[in-house]
Image (spheres, rainbow, N blue to C red):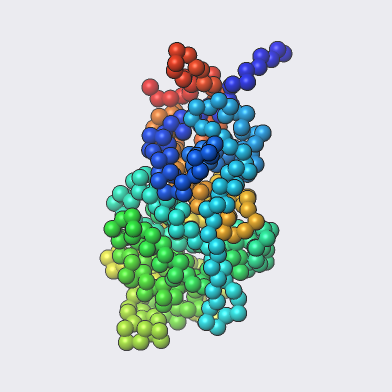
Amino acid sequence: MKIQQSALISAFGGINFVFELLNTKKVDQLLNDNLPVLPQQSQYGWKDLFYSLLSIYMCGGDVIEDLGKNLKPHFTKNPLLNMPSPDTVLRRMKELAIPNKSARTLRGMVEHSFNTNPMLTNLNMRLLKDLGVFNTEELTLDYDNTILFSEKEDCSMTYKRDKGYQPGVCTINESNILYIENRGGNSDAKSFQHETIERAFIALAEHTKRKPDHFRADAASYQYEVVKLLEDKVKNFYIGNRNSYVEKYYSLVNLWESITDSTGECMEIGEVRICPFKKQAGKKAKEYRLIVKRKATKSNQLDLFMGDAYEYRSILTNNLNWSAVEIAIFYNHRGNMEKQFDILKNDFGWNNLPFSHMSQNTVFLHFTSMIRNLYNFIIQHFSTKVKGLKPWYRIKKFIFRFIILPAKFVYRSRQVTLRVFGITNFVT
């Protein structure tokens, strides 16, 4: 076997098409307009730092250290990117960190730590606006918390009995990250949640005058403060409930409608009007619809409270226009949040936090969530240009089918040309 070496050939030639696409969307200008001005003697700009971070995940890496010997040789003399060292990227990200805030509940002894970064939140919102995310017919927001297990210096014990952080994340239209607020691992999802959600709405209102059409959340949002906030900020909300809060109303459901869910299981849907939060709201307490779902238990064992062999779930909503079945089906799509967390953790680095402090890791979460949002735009664009790509593909397939493409830049006649070795599968 004979080997001919060429030091200028990169194994990741497809990433150059991604850089060109981002340049057409003026992502570099967006970064420069919304991030602090770097010193004139800086060798690397925000474009170099951000594109390098993006290259890690779009070239198959999973930690920032991959920028060193693993990736940098493939970007030698690349006219679209001046790739810095991992230390440079980490240092610049540290400079964007904002100190944590802490608080305690009225009766609690636990100190809750929170970290927000308004500058990066604003940058992400502007990016979503430029990508046209706010121009869809309807805006649907989902809120949930997830645990990022880690042994970092300021990590605290989570309810899963392992150390980590527990950030609150709000998505828009199920596939884009709208807002992130990092939290200590010991901060349960319920504490100060209405304040977190309110900050998300305030940030959103600065970039679009539209009131979101729908808001979905789990049982941790079943609070008077949250419901009162949602009444003002969204048209329709859908909040899951713990059975212990509302099971006393289940026996009031008179009419059940049978449907088959996505897994093929049969369930029944009913509804009843209730007036929760009377103690907090007093005479101003409002009436809402309680959508109740039940399905037969596999053991056929009778429930002591209900007196039947059903498993119950319920949703509190102010939507008076949709049927109970339509609301139940719509709320089930909230499960897409778990898919988004899986993508962020396994495809975009959330399982490998680079810093030892929560404030600095918040910066990392914001940058990688923006990369996640850009990936939606990138895969949708190239799925119309390249055979074998679909807009719903995870990043692994995108790397194998598009990014891994031997190529090198050729300098000839005062022009720079990308020479590709292989078949590109571009649609002609």
Give the quadrant of the C terminus.
top left
Q: Is residue 114 above or below residue 82?
A: below
Q: Is residue 235 above or below residue 54?
A: below
Q: Position of residue 294 (x, y in %)?
A: 46, 69
Q: Is residue 267 left or right of residue 138?
A: right
Q: Position of residue 193 (x, y in %)?
A: 47, 70
Of residue 288 and residue 126, the one placed in the foreground of this image is 126
Quarter of the image where one finds residue 408: top right
Q: Position of residue 66 (x, y in %)?
A: 64, 39
Of residue 343 and residue 210, the one placed in the foreground of this image is 210
Q: Is residue 134 above or below residue 285?
A: above
Residue 294 in view in this figure? no
Q: Is residue 395 left or right of residue 178?
A: right
Residue 234 in view in this figure? yes
Question: Which residue does the image show at 55% across and 49% down from the upper left?
Answer: 93
Q: Position of residue 264 (x, y in %)?
A: 47, 55
Q: Is residue 409 left or right of residue 269?
A: right
